[in-house]
Image (tube, grey):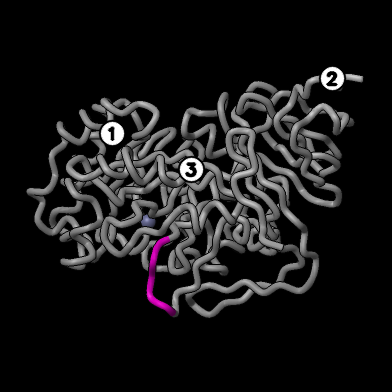
Amino acid sequence: MTQAPQKFDLLLKGGTLLDPGQGIHLLRDVAFSGGRVAEVAEHIAGDLALDVLDAKGKLVTPGLIDVHGHYYHGNGALSVDARRSALPAGVTTVVDAGSAGWANYGALRDYVAPASGLRMLAFLHIGAIGLVTSQVLKGELHDTRVIDVDRTAQHVLDNPGFAVGVKVRMFINSIAYWDAQQVLRQARAAADQSKTRLMVHVSNPPIPLPEILDVMGSGDVVTHVYNGNQEHILDAQGKVRPEVRAAMDRGVVMDVAHAGIHCDIGIVREALAQGFPPTTISTDIHHGPAERVLYQLNDLIGKFVALGLSLDDAVAATTASPAQILGLADEIGSLRVGMAGDAAVFDRDEGDHTWQDAAGNMVKGSLKLHTFATVRDGAVLWRRPE
Ligand SMILES: [Zn+2]
């Protein structure tokens, strides 16, 4: 007797699919073939697939998307190895946030990204060699000769599908305050010339936050939105500042970029209570000092649920929302049939969990997601060791 040929390469069977991009939070089987999502249904027979992963009792989501991390492994001491950090967190798409500029992104695109096995995109820093100068000079834009608007824009334009925008840090140590307005305008110009978007670090800026927000429009990204440093998003009475709310209303993306030092638990609580949720949750993962508490993206879902976001909203902020702001909503961030076969499978650890921030604030939560498997291009790329 001959067996029917298997029509699927991989089947995630028996799990609860949480896919905010298509409004699903239900028991669903998900099958992949040819690297894409082939079928999503209540029951898909196991013998139709070459490989079946038992997801009973587990949570299945689209592969997570980290829109702000430092993934240029080997380029200075800052960046992490995505394969060791993002992949075991259920992340399948990472965006390097300006570790490199126009003069040194080539090896990120040609060697680091392919070696990672993940989908890797990048914001190019407005400084020619990105954050390398920051590590040796304690600030990357003190000498503004490293800025070339035309070349930055051209390299972004020349790399569709890899370069997604321009990054600048409005950070008191990275730039002289008397140059800050000029540099911000140059970064704005490069983003406009490249027809992409601008990502601006707003933690501890050398100029007032409203002046920064003034140059930002729909689709641009405020990163480190909940930092607790000077010039944060709340006014003296603890209310979300009107300029910040106006920016959100006109479509400026509000991105977490946690980093350990850029996300204050008190600010998040106030912001959520006042109806100011994050558009995207990201890690800003990097090699920091030993005392810095950094969280991976699956842990940030748990932390934001502890802070009051629903699980559906936290997963949306790490899947459908980042896909949409990157212009990739037809490809990633959801498990609709035909989309990229990128998924994550988690165990729900429902117990007592404590999350902290750099200021020493704590928040207790009852959910932690432990990655069980990460699926990329329709195949299991990482699985938790037994
Ligand atoms: Zn960063």
Marks 2/1: CA distance? 53 Å
**Camera-nearest residue between 314 and 98:** 98
User: Mark number for residue 117?
Assistant: 3
Please give the name of the residue rendered at 49% of the width and 34% of the height, measured from the top-left corner.
Answer: 325
Q: Name the residue under label 1.
A: 191
Label 2 element class: loop
Which quadrant of the frame does ligand 1 lie within? bottom left
Query: Which residue shows up at 27% across the image and 43% down it?
Result: 107
Could you tell me what secondary structure mostly forms the magenta stretch?
A: loop
Find the distance from the CA under tag 3 to the CA under tag 2.
Answer: 32 Å
x, y percent for residue 281: 55, 51
Q: Quadrant of residue 262?
A: bottom left
Q: What residue type is labelled 1?
A: Ala
Q: Is mark 3 on a helix, strand or loop?
A: loop
Label 3 amino acid? Gly
> Quarter-wise, where is residue 319 in the image?
top right
